[in-house]
Image (cartoon, rainbow, N blue to C red):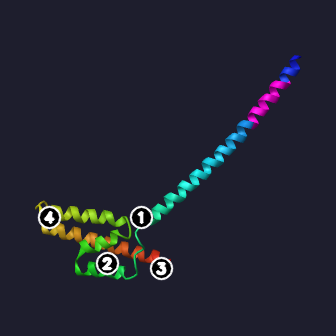
């Protein structure tokens, strides 16, 4: 065999190797992609099952009524079921209530905190209502 024959054989072998490698890689990639798509579908299905049911239309008036009556704790409880943004408000309320009950804050501070949380909750209700109505 001449050196050019050896070179041609090496090129042919290397080309064949690349073809087989790419073919195998493509098959593996396709199998992996299909597996990932199946896993993604299962995760989405599970996530949908764990999602809370959409808030019925009569819940918003309940939240507004609770806020109007001064029952901030119940209003925040209902609001948390709708949006995660309300968790922060609920946490602030719980911490403020604990501070007031322990005597670490006075009545005026406690009332100011409740007013601020109530206003923020009303803004959040308005934001959710707009989102639901498609505006």
Circle nearer the viewer, 3 or 1? 1
Q: Residue at x 16, y 61 (%)?
A: 99
Q: Residues within 10 Å of mark 1 (few under 14, many from 20)?
A: few
Q: What is the x, y in percent for residue 70? A: 22, 78
Mark before the other along the chain sequence, 1 or 2 = 1
Image: magenta residue range: 8-19
Tell me the residue that label 3 is attached to: 133
Mark before the other along the chain sequence, 3 or 1 = 1
Q: What is the x, y in percent for residue 26? A: 69, 44
Q: What is the CA distance from the residue labelled 3 to the residue labelled 1?
A: 24 Å
Q: Residue at x 46, y 62 (%)?
A: 47
Circle nearer the viewer, 4 or 1? 1
Q: Main secondary structure of the magenta part?
A: helix
**Circle 2: element type:** helix
Q: What is the x, y in percent for residue 24? A: 69, 40
Q: What is the CA distance from the residue labelled 1 to the residue labelled 2?
A: 23 Å
Q: What is the x, y in percent for residue 21? A: 71, 36
Tell me the residue that label 1 is attached to: 50
Residue 109 is a magenta residue? no
Mark before the other along the chain sequence, 3 or 4 = 4
Q: Which of the numbered marks, if any, corresponds to residue 100?
A: 4
Q: Is residue 9 above or below residue 26?
A: above
Q: Residues within 10 Å of mark 3 (few under 14, many from 20)?
A: few
**Circle 1: element type:** helix
Circle nearer the viewer, 1 or 2? 1
Mark before the other along the chain sequence, 2 or 3 = 2
Tell me the residue that label 2 is attached to: 63
């Amino acid at each position: 065999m001449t050196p050019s024959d050896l070179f041609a054989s090496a090129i042919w072998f290397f080309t064949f190797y690349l073809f087989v490698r790419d073919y195998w890689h493509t098959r593996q990639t396709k199998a992996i992609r299909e597996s990932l798509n199946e896993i993604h579908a299962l995760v989405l299905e599970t996530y949908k099952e764990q999602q809370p049911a959409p808030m019925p239309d009569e819940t918003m008036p309940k939240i507004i009524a609770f806020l109007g009556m001064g029952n901030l704790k119940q209003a925040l409880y209902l609001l948390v079921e709708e949006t995660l943004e309300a968790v922060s408000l609920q946490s602030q309320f719980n911490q403020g209530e604990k501070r007031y009950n322990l005597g670490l804050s006075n009545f005026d501070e406690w009332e100011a905190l409740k007013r601020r949380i109530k206003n923020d909750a009303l803004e959040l209700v308005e934001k959710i209502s707009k989102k639901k109505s498609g505006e």
